[in-house]
Image: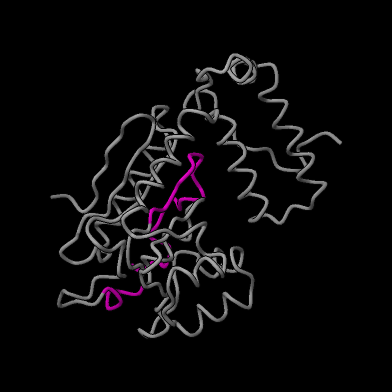
């Protein structure tokens, strides 16, 4: 049994944290497998959306404390608070977190990095690290305030308190909440819709622009310049023509642009002509 199961079908990669006997408690080995899967899926044109979920009745209940050595006891020089490398938001492929049960500590901070988060209504959630004598991780001091605002982020990060799916939705942490048994099915339906109906290059460019805008703090007019520049990359090309023709003919589009062969990083704002 591997700590991460990867299954690819119909344009969707389903990544399943797979330590159900430990409620998918996070280990360095699991993290390394997730990092590898993220990279490989992002380089695979057959993968147009990624769904991350957990086996059994939990998503991930945090770091694994079941061994004789605490994950926080290691040599200081070997520790990183950013074990997810790349983070989900650093990929070009849309990532959906199907949080099918409890997500505590790093279990929740990993999910915060996804583009879309579907949470179970009746599960428990917390960024509990301050209650363990350490700090929140996985860039949650950046992801959480961008999702919820500074006041809510301070409440969650500084208290480490537990909350449910309804409160997660109200705070902006969840894209939506559903009964536990419907979370994965809904996430897979969203992913399959993306895989079929969304042009992969368009999704990749839009995702990168969205997250780069948050990371780099672009102004509205800078975003307008970047949107124009990225439109110029796709206008008149195969997928732009195919998208319109498929819409008018009421058929499934057949996308042709290849991210693995044709991807170019987004330009810096000062590289764009006025």
Q: Residue at x 50, y 65 (%)?
A: 139
Query: Residue 164's image quarter?
Result: bottom left
**How many numbered tags mark residues here?**
0
Residue 122 drawn at (x, y percent): 37, 69
Q: Is residue 238 visible?
A: no
- Rendered residue at 31%/46% (across/down): 15
Q: On the rendered image, what quadrant is the C terminus found in?
A: top right
Q: Is residue 119 above or below residue 228?
A: below
Given residues 116 and 138, the one toward you in this image is 116
126 vs 36, left or right, is right
Image coords of residue 104 (percent x, y) = 36, 71
- Viewer-side residue, 131 vs 170: 170
Q: Is residue 43 left or right of residue 14?
A: right
As drawn, 172 above or below 75: above
In the rendered view, does 184 fall on the left or right side of 211?
A: left
Give the magenta-colored segment's residue range: 71-98
Q: Is residue 175 magenta?
A: no
Residue 195 visible to an observer of this rendering: yes
The residue closer to the viewer here, 257 or 178, is 178
User: Residue at position x 79%, y 53% from top?
Assistant: 219
- Dominant secondary structure of the magenta stretch? loop
Residue 13: image location, x then y, percent? 35, 38
């Amino acid at each position: 049994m591997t700590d991460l199961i990867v299954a690819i079908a119909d344009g969707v990669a389903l990544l399943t944290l797979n330590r159900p006997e430990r409620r998918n408690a996070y280990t360095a080995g699991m993290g390394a497998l997730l990092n590898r899967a993220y990279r490989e899926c992002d380089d695979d044109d057959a993968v147009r959306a990624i769904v991350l979920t957990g086996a059994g009745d939990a998503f991930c209940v945090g770091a694994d404390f079941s061994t004789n050595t605490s994950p926080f006891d290691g040599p200081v020089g070997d520790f990183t608070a950013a074990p997810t490398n790349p983070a989900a938001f650093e990929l070009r492929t849309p990532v959906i977190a199907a949080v099918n049960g409890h997500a505590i500590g790093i279990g929740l901070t990993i999910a915060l990095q996804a583009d879309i988060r579907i949470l179970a209504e009746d599960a428990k959630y917390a960024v509990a690290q301050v209650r363990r004598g350490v700090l929140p991780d996985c860039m949650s001091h950046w992801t959480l305030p961008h999702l919820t605002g500074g006041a809510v982020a301070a409440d969650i990060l500084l208290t480490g308190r537990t909350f449910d799916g309804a409160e997660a939705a109200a705070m902006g942490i969840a894209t939506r909440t559903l009964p536990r048994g419907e979370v994965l099915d809904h996430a897979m339906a969203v992913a399959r819709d993306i895989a079929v109906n969304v042009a992969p290059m368009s999704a990749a460019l839009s995702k990168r622009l969205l997250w780069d805008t948050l990371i780099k703090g672009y102004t509205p007019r800078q975003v307008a310049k970047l949107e124009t520049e990225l439109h110029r990359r796709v206008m008149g090309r195969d997928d732009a023509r195919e998208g319109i023709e498929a819409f008018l003919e009421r058929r499934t589009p057949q996308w042709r642009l290849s991210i693995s062969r044709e991807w170019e990083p987004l330009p810096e704002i000062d590289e764009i002509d006025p």
